[in-house]
Protein backbone atom coordinates (compact mmCIF):
# COMPACT_ATOMS: atom_id res chain seq x y z
CA UNK A 1 0.00 0.00 0.00
CA UNK A 2 2.84 2.36 0.92
CA UNK A 3 4.62 1.52 -2.32
CA UNK A 4 1.49 2.31 -4.33
CA UNK A 5 1.08 5.66 -2.50
CA UNK A 6 4.72 6.52 -3.13
CA UNK A 7 4.34 5.63 -6.81
CA UNK A 8 1.25 7.86 -7.11
CA UNK A 9 3.08 10.74 -5.47
CA UNK A 10 6.05 10.30 -7.79
CA UNK A 11 3.78 10.21 -10.85
CA UNK A 12 1.92 13.32 -9.69
CA UNK A 13 5.17 15.13 -9.04
CA UNK A 14 6.50 14.07 -12.42
CA UNK A 15 3.34 15.36 -14.12
CA UNK A 16 3.60 18.71 -12.31
CA UNK A 17 7.27 19.09 -13.25
CA UNK A 18 6.50 18.11 -16.85
CA UNK A 19 3.67 20.68 -17.00
CA UNK A 20 5.94 23.38 -15.57
CA UNK A 21 8.67 22.57 -18.08
CA UNK A 22 6.09 22.60 -20.89
CA UNK A 23 4.80 26.02 -19.78
CA UNK A 24 8.34 27.40 -19.72
CA UNK A 25 9.03 25.82 -23.10
CA UNK A 26 6.02 27.62 -24.57
CA UNK A 27 7.83 30.87 -23.83
CA UNK A 28 7.16 34.45 -22.83
CA UNK A 29 4.34 36.55 -24.27
CA UNK A 30 4.47 40.33 -23.79
CA UNK A 31 1.13 42.15 -23.47
CA UNK A 32 1.72 45.86 -24.04
CA UNK A 33 -1.12 48.40 -23.74
CA UNK A 34 -1.82 52.00 -22.74
CA UNK A 35 -2.08 52.81 -19.03
CA UNK A 36 -4.36 50.66 -16.90
CA UNK A 37 -5.62 53.86 -15.29
CA UNK A 38 -8.24 53.45 -18.00
CA UNK A 39 -10.05 50.21 -17.02
CA UNK A 40 -10.55 49.37 -20.70
CA UNK A 41 -6.83 48.72 -21.14
CA UNK A 42 -6.52 46.89 -17.85
CA UNK A 43 -9.34 44.55 -18.86
CA UNK A 44 -7.85 43.76 -22.27
CA UNK A 45 -4.39 43.17 -20.80
CA UNK A 46 -5.72 40.87 -18.09
CA UNK A 47 -7.77 38.91 -20.64
CA UNK A 48 -4.78 38.44 -22.95
CA UNK A 49 -2.49 37.43 -20.09
CA UNK A 50 -4.99 34.92 -18.69
CA UNK A 51 -5.59 33.35 -22.11
CA UNK A 52 -1.86 33.07 -22.80
CA UNK A 53 -1.25 31.41 -19.45
CA UNK A 54 -4.13 28.99 -20.04
CA UNK A 55 -2.32 27.90 -23.22
CA UNK A 56 0.93 27.24 -21.38
CA UNK A 57 2.82 30.49 -21.93
CA UNK A 58 4.21 32.83 -19.32
CA UNK A 59 2.94 36.38 -19.83
CA UNK A 60 3.88 39.85 -18.69
CA UNK A 61 1.73 43.01 -18.76
CA UNK A 62 3.47 46.27 -19.64
CA UNK A 63 2.23 49.81 -20.35
CA UNK A 64 3.59 52.32 -22.85
CA UNK A 65 1.38 55.15 -21.50
CA UNK A 66 0.64 56.26 -25.09
CA UNK A 67 4.28 57.26 -25.47
CA UNK A 68 5.75 55.90 -28.76
CA UNK A 69 9.31 56.22 -27.44
CA UNK A 70 8.50 54.17 -24.35
CA UNK A 71 6.66 51.65 -26.53
CA UNK A 72 9.75 51.25 -28.72
CA UNK A 73 11.90 50.68 -25.63
CA UNK A 74 9.49 48.06 -24.28
CA UNK A 75 9.46 46.18 -27.59
CA UNK A 76 13.25 46.37 -27.68
CA UNK A 77 13.41 44.97 -24.14
CA UNK A 78 11.06 42.11 -25.03
CA UNK A 79 13.23 41.23 -28.03
CA UNK A 80 16.25 41.13 -25.71
CA UNK A 81 14.36 38.82 -23.35
CA UNK A 82 13.54 36.46 -26.20
CA UNK A 83 9.78 36.85 -26.09
CA UNK A 84 7.92 34.47 -28.38
CA UNK A 85 5.27 37.05 -29.36
CA UNK A 86 3.84 40.47 -28.56
CA UNK A 87 0.19 41.35 -28.03
CA UNK A 88 -0.04 45.12 -28.56
CA UNK A 89 -2.59 47.89 -28.15
CA UNK A 90 -0.40 50.52 -29.73
CA UNK A 91 0.66 54.10 -29.07
CA UNK A 92 -0.23 55.56 -32.48
CA UNK A 93 -0.98 54.20 -35.93
CA UNK A 94 2.06 55.79 -37.61
CA UNK A 95 4.43 56.03 -34.64
CA UNK A 96 4.11 52.30 -33.88
CA UNK A 97 5.22 50.97 -37.28
CA UNK A 98 8.94 51.14 -36.49
CA UNK A 99 8.56 49.17 -33.26
CA UNK A 100 6.53 46.42 -34.93
CA UNK A 101 8.99 46.27 -37.83
CA UNK A 102 11.80 45.88 -35.32
CA UNK A 103 10.00 42.92 -33.74
CA UNK A 104 9.29 41.43 -37.17
CA UNK A 105 12.97 41.67 -38.11
CA UNK A 106 13.79 39.85 -34.86
CA UNK A 107 11.28 37.14 -35.90
CA UNK A 108 8.94 38.00 -33.04
CA UNK A 109 5.37 38.21 -34.35
CA UNK A 110 3.11 41.03 -33.19
CA UNK A 111 -0.67 40.76 -32.82
CA UNK A 112 -2.50 44.09 -32.56
CA UNK A 113 -5.71 44.61 -30.63
CA UNK A 114 -8.05 47.62 -30.36
CA UNK A 115 -5.91 49.98 -32.47
CA UNK A 116 -4.58 49.38 -35.95
CA UNK A 117 -1.38 50.65 -37.56
CA UNK A 118 -1.03 52.41 -40.90
CA UNK A 119 1.16 49.85 -42.68
CA UNK A 120 -0.02 46.34 -43.64
CA UNK A 121 2.00 43.08 -43.53
CA UNK A 122 4.07 44.15 -40.54
CA UNK A 123 1.88 42.78 -37.75
CA UNK A 124 0.53 39.26 -38.16
CA UNK A 125 -3.00 40.19 -37.02
CA UNK A 126 -4.87 43.44 -36.42
CA UNK A 127 -8.00 42.56 -34.44
CA UNK A 128 -10.01 45.68 -33.74
CA UNK A 129 -13.50 46.84 -32.92
CA UNK A 130 -15.64 47.94 -35.84
CA UNK A 131 -15.35 51.53 -34.68
CA UNK A 132 -17.37 52.98 -37.54
CA UNK A 133 -20.27 50.58 -36.93
CA UNK A 134 -20.07 51.18 -33.19
CA UNK A 135 -20.01 54.95 -33.59
CA UNK A 136 -23.03 54.79 -35.86
CA UNK A 137 -25.18 52.84 -33.41
CA UNK A 138 -24.09 55.20 -30.63
CA UNK A 139 -25.01 58.19 -32.79
CA UNK A 140 -28.38 56.67 -33.64
CA UNK A 141 -29.14 56.31 -29.93
CA UNK A 142 -27.93 59.88 -29.33
CA UNK A 143 -30.21 61.27 -32.05
CA UNK A 144 -33.19 59.44 -30.58
CA UNK A 145 -32.41 60.64 -27.04
CA UNK A 146 -32.05 64.22 -28.34
CA UNK A 147 -35.44 64.04 -30.05
CA UNK A 148 -33.66 64.88 -33.32
CA UNK A 149 -33.03 68.50 -32.31
CA UNK A 150 -30.97 70.74 -30.06
CA UNK A 151 -27.39 71.94 -29.61
CA UNK A 152 -24.69 69.45 -28.75
CA UNK A 153 -20.96 69.04 -28.11
CA UNK A 154 -18.55 66.37 -29.34
CA UNK A 155 -15.48 65.28 -27.37
CA UNK A 156 -12.98 63.38 -29.51
CA UNK A 157 -9.98 61.23 -28.66
CA UNK A 158 -6.26 61.53 -29.29
CA UNK A 159 -5.41 62.94 -32.74
CA UNK A 160 -2.72 60.30 -33.35
CA UNK A 161 -5.18 57.46 -32.77
CA UNK A 162 -6.93 56.32 -35.95
CA UNK A 163 -9.92 55.22 -33.88
CA UNK A 164 -10.63 58.82 -32.86
CA UNK A 165 -11.16 59.91 -36.46
CA UNK A 166 -13.14 56.82 -37.42
CA UNK A 167 -15.52 57.23 -34.49
CA UNK A 168 -16.03 60.91 -35.17
CA UNK A 169 -16.85 60.16 -38.80
CA UNK A 170 -19.29 57.45 -37.71
CA UNK A 171 -21.01 59.92 -35.40
CA UNK A 172 -21.34 62.60 -38.04
CA UNK A 173 -22.44 60.32 -40.85
CA UNK A 174 -25.56 59.79 -38.74
CA UNK A 175 -26.02 63.07 -36.85
CA UNK A 176 -25.42 65.36 -39.83
CA UNK A 177 -28.55 63.99 -41.50
CA UNK A 178 -30.61 65.83 -38.87
CA UNK A 179 -30.53 69.58 -39.62
CA UNK A 180 -32.05 70.53 -36.25
CA UNK A 181 -29.09 69.04 -34.40
CA UNK A 182 -26.45 71.79 -34.10
CA UNK A 183 -22.88 71.11 -32.96
CA UNK A 184 -21.68 74.15 -30.99
CA UNK A 185 -18.26 72.79 -29.94
CA UNK A 186 -15.89 69.97 -30.85
CA UNK A 187 -12.71 69.46 -28.83
CA UNK A 188 -10.19 66.70 -28.14
CA UNK A 189 -9.90 65.49 -24.57
CA UNK A 190 -7.29 62.86 -25.55
CA UNK A 191 -9.36 59.97 -24.15
CA UNK A 192 -8.82 61.32 -20.60
CA UNK A 193 -11.42 61.86 -17.88
CA UNK A 194 -9.68 64.79 -16.19
CA UNK A 195 -9.18 66.58 -19.51
CA UNK A 196 -12.82 65.99 -20.49
CA UNK A 197 -13.90 67.50 -17.16
CA UNK A 198 -11.91 70.70 -17.70
CA UNK A 199 -12.84 70.98 -21.38
CA UNK A 200 -16.53 70.55 -20.52
CA UNK A 201 -16.32 73.27 -17.91
CA UNK A 202 -14.91 75.71 -20.47
CA UNK A 203 -17.44 74.72 -23.13
CA UNK A 204 -20.32 75.20 -20.68
CA UNK A 205 -19.24 78.76 -19.95
CA UNK A 206 -19.66 79.63 -23.63
CA UNK A 207 -22.64 77.32 -24.28
CA UNK A 208 -24.73 77.05 -21.11
CA UNK A 209 -27.82 75.70 -22.90
CA UNK A 210 -26.42 72.61 -24.59
CA UNK A 211 -28.74 69.62 -24.72
CA UNK A 212 -26.28 66.77 -25.36
CA UNK A 213 -22.67 65.58 -25.43
CA UNK A 214 -21.40 62.68 -27.53
CA UNK A 215 -17.99 61.31 -26.58
CA UNK A 216 -15.43 59.14 -28.33
CA UNK A 217 -14.89 56.98 -25.25
CA UNK A 218 -16.28 56.31 -21.78
CA UNK A 219 -13.58 58.02 -19.75
CA UNK A 220 -14.32 61.29 -21.55
CA UNK A 221 -18.04 60.68 -21.05
CA UNK A 222 -17.45 60.26 -17.31
CA UNK A 223 -15.44 63.47 -17.15
CA UNK A 224 -17.99 65.41 -19.18
CA UNK A 225 -20.91 64.17 -17.10
CA UNK A 226 -19.11 65.01 -13.84
CA UNK A 227 -18.56 68.59 -15.05
CA UNK A 228 -22.16 68.90 -16.19
CA UNK A 229 -23.51 67.57 -12.91
CA UNK A 230 -21.24 69.85 -10.86
CA UNK A 231 -22.59 72.83 -12.83
CA UNK A 232 -26.20 71.80 -12.25
CA UNK A 233 -26.68 70.39 -15.76
CA UNK A 234 -27.09 66.73 -14.86
CA UNK A 235 -30.04 66.46 -17.25
CA UNK A 236 -27.82 66.96 -20.33
CA UNK A 237 -27.77 63.83 -22.51
CA UNK A 238 -24.36 62.13 -22.53
CA UNK A 239 -23.41 59.13 -24.67
CA UNK A 240 -20.03 57.40 -24.60
CA UNK A 241 -18.23 54.48 -26.21
CA UNK A 242 -16.34 51.52 -24.65
CA UNK A 243 -18.76 49.71 -22.33
CA UNK A 244 -17.05 50.31 -18.97
CA UNK A 245 -18.44 49.36 -15.58
CA UNK A 246 -18.32 53.02 -14.51
CA UNK A 247 -20.62 54.09 -17.33
CA UNK A 248 -22.80 51.01 -16.79
CA UNK A 249 -23.32 52.15 -13.18
CA UNK A 250 -24.07 55.70 -14.32
CA UNK A 251 -26.66 54.43 -16.82
CA UNK A 252 -28.35 52.38 -14.12
CA UNK A 253 -28.44 55.45 -11.87
CA UNK A 254 -29.98 57.66 -14.58
CA UNK A 255 -26.83 59.65 -15.36
CA UNK A 256 -25.08 58.91 -18.65
CA UNK A 257 -27.71 57.62 -21.07
CA UNK A 258 -25.85 55.10 -23.25
CA UNK A 259 -22.52 53.71 -24.37
CA UNK A 260 -21.28 51.31 -27.04
CA UNK A 261 -19.59 48.11 -25.94
CA UNK A 262 -16.37 47.29 -27.75
CA UNK A 263 -15.69 43.52 -27.72
CA UNK A 264 -12.25 44.07 -26.22
CA UNK A 265 -12.18 40.80 -24.24
CA UNK A 266 -12.99 38.88 -27.41
CA UNK A 267 -10.29 40.81 -29.28
CA UNK A 268 -7.64 40.03 -26.66
CA UNK A 269 -8.52 36.35 -26.41
CA UNK A 270 -8.77 35.93 -30.18
CA UNK A 271 -5.35 37.52 -30.63
CA UNK A 272 -3.80 35.05 -28.20
CA UNK A 273 -5.50 32.06 -29.85
CA UNK A 274 -4.24 33.22 -33.25
CA UNK A 275 -0.79 33.81 -31.78
CA UNK A 276 -0.69 30.24 -30.48
CA UNK A 277 -1.80 28.86 -33.84
CA UNK A 278 0.75 30.99 -35.69
CA UNK A 279 3.63 29.95 -33.44
CA UNK A 280 2.73 26.29 -33.93
CA UNK A 281 1.85 26.27 -37.63
CA UNK A 282 3.15 29.48 -39.20
CA UNK A 283 -0.33 30.76 -40.03
CA UNK A 284 -3.35 32.13 -38.18
CA UNK A 285 -5.78 30.94 -40.83
CA UNK A 286 -7.38 34.41 -40.81
CA UNK A 287 -6.98 37.73 -42.62
CA UNK A 288 -4.57 40.22 -41.11
CA UNK A 289 -7.24 42.84 -40.39
CA UNK A 290 -10.33 41.64 -38.55
CA UNK A 291 -13.25 43.83 -37.45
CA UNK A 292 -15.53 42.81 -34.56
CA UNK A 293 -18.92 44.49 -34.25
CA UNK A 294 -19.95 46.57 -31.24
CA UNK A 295 -23.17 46.54 -29.17
CA UNK A 296 -25.29 49.41 -27.82
CA UNK A 297 -25.59 49.52 -24.02
CA UNK A 298 -28.45 51.45 -22.44
CA UNK A 299 -30.90 51.00 -19.58
CA UNK A 300 -32.39 47.92 -21.28
CA UNK A 301 -29.25 45.79 -21.00
CA UNK A 302 -26.78 47.61 -18.71
CA UNK A 303 -27.29 45.11 -15.89
CA UNK A 304 -25.84 42.36 -18.12
CA UNK A 305 -22.54 44.19 -18.62
CA UNK A 306 -19.52 43.25 -16.52
CA UNK A 307 -15.97 44.37 -17.27
CA UNK A 308 -16.45 44.86 -20.99
CA UNK A 309 -18.36 41.63 -21.49
CA UNK A 310 -22.11 41.24 -22.01
CA UNK A 311 -23.76 38.15 -20.56
CA UNK A 312 -26.65 36.40 -22.29
Image: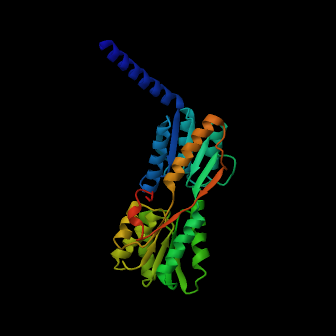
Count of labels in the image? 0
**Residue farthest to the top, as pictured:** 3
Q: Could you tell me which residue is drawn at 55 percent across and 68 percent down? A: 135
Q: Quadrant of the N terminus?
A: top left
* Residue 35 appears in the rendering: no
**Residue farthest to the left, as pictured:** 2
Q: Position of residue 242 (x, y in %)?
A: 48, 62
The residue lying toward the viewer, choosing from 42 and 292, is: 292
**What's the image's color scheme?**
rainbow
Q: Position of residue 312 (x, y in %)?
A: 44, 59
The residue lying toward the viewer, choosing from 251 and 67, is: 251
Please say if 207 is above or below 60.
below
Please say if 188 is above or below 208.
above
* Residue 111 appears in the rendering: yes
Q: Could you tell me which residue is drawn at 65 percent across and 48 percent down? A: 286
**Residue farthest to the front, as pictured:** 1
Would residue 211 appear left or right of 179 to someone viewing this image? Answer: left
Q: Position of residue 138 (x, y in %)?
A: 52, 71
Please say if 53 is above or below 21.
below
- Snapshot quadrant of residue 176: bottom right
Q: Position of residue 156 (x, y in %)?
A: 53, 68
Amino acid sequence: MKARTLLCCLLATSFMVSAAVSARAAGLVAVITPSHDNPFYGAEADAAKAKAESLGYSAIELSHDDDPAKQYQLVEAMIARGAKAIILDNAGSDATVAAVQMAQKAKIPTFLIDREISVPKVAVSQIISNNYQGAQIGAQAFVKLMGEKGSYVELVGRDSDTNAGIRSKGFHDVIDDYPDLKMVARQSANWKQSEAFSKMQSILEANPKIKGVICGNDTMAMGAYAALKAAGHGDVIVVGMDGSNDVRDSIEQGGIRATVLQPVIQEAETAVVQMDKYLKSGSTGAAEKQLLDCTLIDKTNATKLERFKLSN
